[in-house]
Image: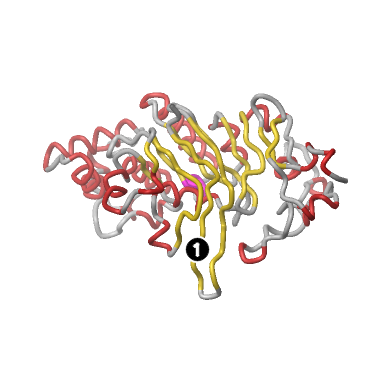
Amino acid sequence: MSLLRVEDLRVEFNTRDGSVTPLDGVSFDMEKGEILGIVGETGSGKSVTAQAIMGLLPFLDGRVAGGTITFMGEDLTGLDESKYQKLRGNRVSLIPQNPMTSLDPVYTVGDQIVEGLTLHTGLNGRAAAQKAISIMSSLGIPNAAKVFHQYPHQLSGGLKQRIVIAMGLCGDPKLLIADEPTTALDVTVQAQIVALFKKTVAEQNLGLIMITHDLGVIAHLCDRVAVMYAGSLVETGPVTSVFKHPSHPYTRSLINCVPKLGMAAEDLAAIPGNVPSVRSYPGGCRYHPRCAMAREICRREIPAEHRVNSDIRVKCHEFSPKEGN
């Protein structure tokens, strides 16, 4: 049984101008101890995927309009808020995008970790404080007992990120979702946080979804990668296979945009255009207006999912030439 299985997920949001569908037909699964990277440009639907899994859509005037989200055999799409509250933090935990704004500036970081422990485990007082310091120490926070009594403004960006991770681990979750956790950090600290995630997954045998636009983070951390564009997964497979032999034109373009050592500035590739607005997704393949390989069928028909081999799945008409030209 998979730890998490998302099948044909469709999400709608209500707006003043009518409903929009930022996710349409998203499917993937993952196992315990696995690290899955979801990568794509801003506006691709990565964070909405996390919000759907966490049951946060109703707070954003959104809903799951189709498909299923199954976690440890339980269908989450039918849960009411009271049941989701028991799930969040205990079995599924979210590390938010910006550690600088995720911590309350008027409380010590220790108090904020203890609050999570009290809520999810029932620990109080000295027992909760000792557990918090133990979690902090396990995450490589030096002088954890001292840091426990400090306020967020007294900590570096890297330490703040470790505190947010500690808060996410309070309830001993089976699935951890990290939404752009390294974006605001310098390269050296990014490497430390990536190593920390690897260590935590290995020691606790939990599943980790890493949401990022950074292909370097995906390459160093993840077992599998799901490439997202305009609310749809266009390619999924093992990181090594996808990065060595990318099948979808969008995946190839993303990889070509990464600067390489010794590359001249004029040789750096760029993808023409922008990710389309959720209000104006094009017909057919949503990538076709930016794709150099687009054919007439790409403008007319949504591509089906094809298996390139036993590991890689891709949505592209390049793999269905008999359907048209």
User: Looking at this rendering, what residue extends furthest in the bottom direction?
Assistant: 16
Label 1 secondary element: strand
Q: Residue 56 at what x, y percent from top left?
A: 39, 55
Q: Residue 94 at what x, y percent from top left?
A: 39, 46
Q: Which three-letter amino acid code belongs to the residue tagged 1?
A: Phe
Q: Residue 14 at what x, y percent from top left?
A: 49, 67
Residue matched to label 1: 13
Q: Main secondary structure of the magenta part?
A: loop
Tell me what residue is drawn at x 39 percent, y 57 percent.
Answer: 101
Whether residue 181 is in magenta: the answer is yes
Whether residue 89 is in magenta: the answer is no
**Front residue (pair 163, 286):** 286
Quadrant location of the N terminus in the rendered image: top left
| 206 relative to 36 in the view: left or right | left
Q: Residue 55 at what x, y percent from top left?
A: 39, 51
**Front residue (pair 264, 278):** 278
| 146 relative to 251 in the view: left or right | left
